[in-house]
Amino acid sequence: MTASVPDAQVLHVLKSVWGYEQFRGVQQDIVRAVVGGENALVLMPTGGGKSLCYQVPSLLRKGVGVVVSPLIALMKDQVDALRENGVRAAYLNSSLSPDAAREVEAALLSGELDLLYAAPERLLTPRTLDLLARSEVALFAIDEAHCVSQWGHDFRPEYQGLGVLAERFPDLPRLALTATADERTRADIIRVLSLEDAHLFVSSFDRPNIQYRIQQKGAGKAGPKSELLDFIRAEHPGEAGIVYCLSRRSVEETAQWLSAQGVAALPYHAGLSPRERNSAQERFLQEEGLIVVATVAFGMGIDKSNVRFVAHLDLPKSLEGYYQETGRAGRDGLPSTAWMTYGLADVVNVRRMLAQSEAPEHVKRVEAGKLDSLLAYCETASCRRQVLLGYFGETLPEPCGNCDTCLNPPQTFDATRPAQMALSAAIRTGNRFGAAHLTDVLLGNATERVRGLGHHQLPTFGVGKMLPDRAWRNIMRQLVALGYLTTDAAGHGSLIASAKAGPLLKGEETLWLREDVLTPPSSKKARRSAGAAALGAQAGNLFEALRALRLKLAREQAVPPYVIFND
Ligand code: ADP
Ligand code: MG
């Protein structure tokens, strides 16, 4: 074990190698612990400065610091940057020629390296493990350590093999680093890497310079792509951004469409050739004001400081995924936007994917919980930042004052009656129809389909006339998000009243839902005032309608026809 090193010496390394005057936050404590030979688990948001936590100790301890990273594409950049600072760094991965790999191995054995980056599958070969056993190693750093966890969004089976490091090298410090902080992932990292005795270092996950916003799809007439375009033009013209879509096809379509509108955008997804992907990544890093439209395949480890916005056109997989993806905005600390548009179809879609999943029951239960947290975040009427940080176990004492719900507090309304109507419409029609058909029934639209099925004769036909079409979409979306309505496993988009709906239908429960924020802020300057005014105007209409509904119901007095559980 290395004895403790004076702080002055540590700071000297920081200054002379990287040119930095001081450490950020917990960096120095981490460095001190690892230099002293202790194990550590570091939870720090993206851009927080995890690399220095293992790079500095690698220079201060005898031997080579071995860094496990899943990001083969970025290893070369990292190593080049270190070499420029005079650090003797190298990497081992499948991109090296056999000759080049042998050179690195020779340097390792003869003690000529300060830092060695390796892909996990390469590190875990008997050959490399044997080489390491014969070399002097300063420490093992496991970067992006959440990859060990099946619960995470970046599971890499190879990472699970890293448990052997503790067995083969019990006396060397192990340092696991990740920006994913939830309990389950943390527990997996500790278990797989045998870090039970490790010091835990947690930095705040708050990213105060990121403004979190979620806009309901359908707020703009022309669809989500043009809502995105309006957002970019109004708030981030000519600035760098990342747009996330679920499918390769929508990535391609969106990138093409944006380019056709005069906004420079490149597609990025796993279906492109490595050359195309590299070129997109390079251009994004090097050029100013470029937008990458991507699947989640894009972004991990990409260190571009001036990404001004991250947009989601589809729901992310989980709040962890959302936090990581949005965290790629504003690493330079300047104001940035996390913008998302989402609607009923997204909710139905993710619920359906979960229903169709063939994962074992206990896995599905966890996934369902994660999905509930994500949807609760989307639908919250309180500060988004508080909800987001709360999910990661952090408390933000005051509302942030910067997210959409703080700037334009959404109204909530007593939606008990309309919810009963929607649920009854689903039940009366046999739990076999999607939102569009149920809305037709509620609004009393005697479409061909409605008449063909005889649904115009149901007691629920036309009971919801007093609310506009989009109010019903809003209500049904929230009912699905909250689990009162579920979706069919076959994926037809049918909405099914769940067991949870019972008490609500019997009138034993009241339900408050959020009014939608229907109008995006119009421009940077006028954001607060114009956004709020327009919102007020639109919400006004809906509130009028709801008030009328309440009056009507009060006048009717009788047991309404849609409370069928009382039939
Ligand atoms: P992470 O891996 O946590 O996402 P990085 O290690 O890539 O973050 O660091 C993000 C950025 O912050 C890098 O540009 C890095 O040079 C810079 N940085 C980290 N620590 C310091 C520091 N103590 N002083 C100045 N800049 C720092
Ligand atoms: Mg990193």
Image: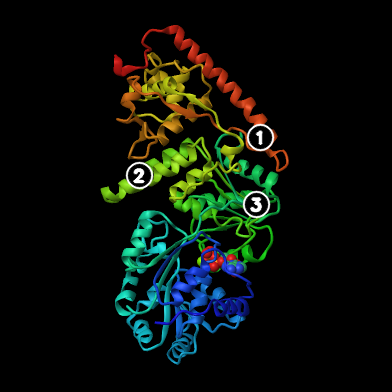
Q: Against 169, is 157 above or below?
A: above
- Quarter residue 145 falls in: bottom left
Q: Which mark is residue 531?
A: 1
Which residue is labeled 2 in the image? 368
Mark 2 to mark 3 CA distance (whole Å): 33 Å
Of helix, strand and loop, which one carries label 2?
A: helix
Depth order, front residue of 10/495 = 10
The amino acid on which the numbered mark 3 sits, given as a three-letter code, is Pro
Of helix, strand and loop, which one carries label 1?
A: helix
Q: Is residue 559 visible?
A: yes
> At x 65% / y 55%, what residue is drawn?
334
> At x 35% / y 65%, what residue is drawn?
157
Q: Nearer the viewer, mark 1 or mark 3?
A: 3
The amino acid on which the numbered mark 1 sits, given as a three-letter code, is Gly
> At x 51% / y 26%, what residue is drawn?
471
Give the x, y percent position of residue 217: 55, 37
Q: Earlier in the sequence, mark 1 or mark 3?
A: 3
Q: Earlier in the sequence, mark 2 or mark 3?
A: 3
Q: Against 131, is 146 above or below?
A: above
Mark 1 to mark 3 CA distance (whole Å): 19 Å
The amino acid on which the numbered mark 2 sits, given as a three-letter code, is Ala
Give the x, y percent position of residue 234: 69, 44
Classed neighbour count for the residue bearing mark 3: other residues with Cα under 10 Å, few (<14), some (14–19), many (≥20): some
Q: Earlier in the sequence, mark 1 or mark 2?
A: 2
